[in-house]
Amino acid sequence: MARGGKREGAGRPVGAVTQRSREVADLAAKEGLTPLEYMLDVLRDESADTKDRMWAAEKAAPYIHPKLANIEHSGGIDVTTQTKEQRDAAVAAATRADA
């Protein structure tokens, strides 16, 4: 009899918010000061210690500036076997296409 291990479709989906987490976040927003708002207040307070402001900037940054996703280029330009003139023409064509 198999026991344990990963089963297809078992468990909470990745990134799902639990009911309790949603209630806590809604309550914090309703009361007016979320953790992010607090960190931004510390960051903007010029009289605060520099270490505290740096901490706030580091912790708030992922919420304000999320990491960019990687993309895969699917272009068909092979510059290893082309002459300089062919590469220049390909770059010029790509530039015109973007404009």
Image: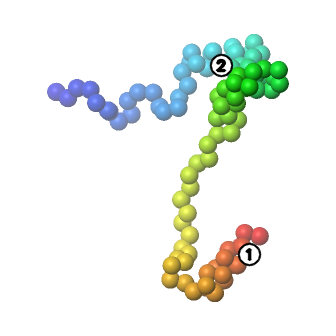
Residue designated by label 1? 96
Foreground of the two, 26 or 64: 64
Q: Which residue is mark 2?
A: 25
List the single residue furthest toward the right. Answer: 46
In the rendered structure, find residue 53 and report the number of the disc placed on it.
Answer: none
Kindly tell me whether residue 14 is visible in this rendering.
yes
Classify residue 91 as left or right of residue 99.
left
**What residue type is disc 2 on?**
Ala
Query: Dot 1: what SS?
Result: helix
Measuring 67% from the left and 26% from the top, which residue is drawn there? 55
Q: Residue at x 54, y 66 (%)?
A: 74
Give residue 12's position: percent from left, percent from top.
45, 27
Residue 78 image offset from top left, x and y in percent? 52, 77
Q: Is residue 39 above or below residue 90?
A: above
Q: Is residue 37 above or below residue 93?
A: above
- Nearest the eye: 42 or 64: 42
Q: Is residue 60 visible?
A: no
Above or below 52: residue 96: below
For mark 1, does the 10 Å Cα neighbourhood hold few (<14), some (14 to 19), or many (20 or more) residues?
few
Q: Position of residue 16 (x, y in %)?
A: 53, 29
Residue positioned 74% across, 25% down in the render: 50
Q: Quadrant of the N terminus?
A: top left
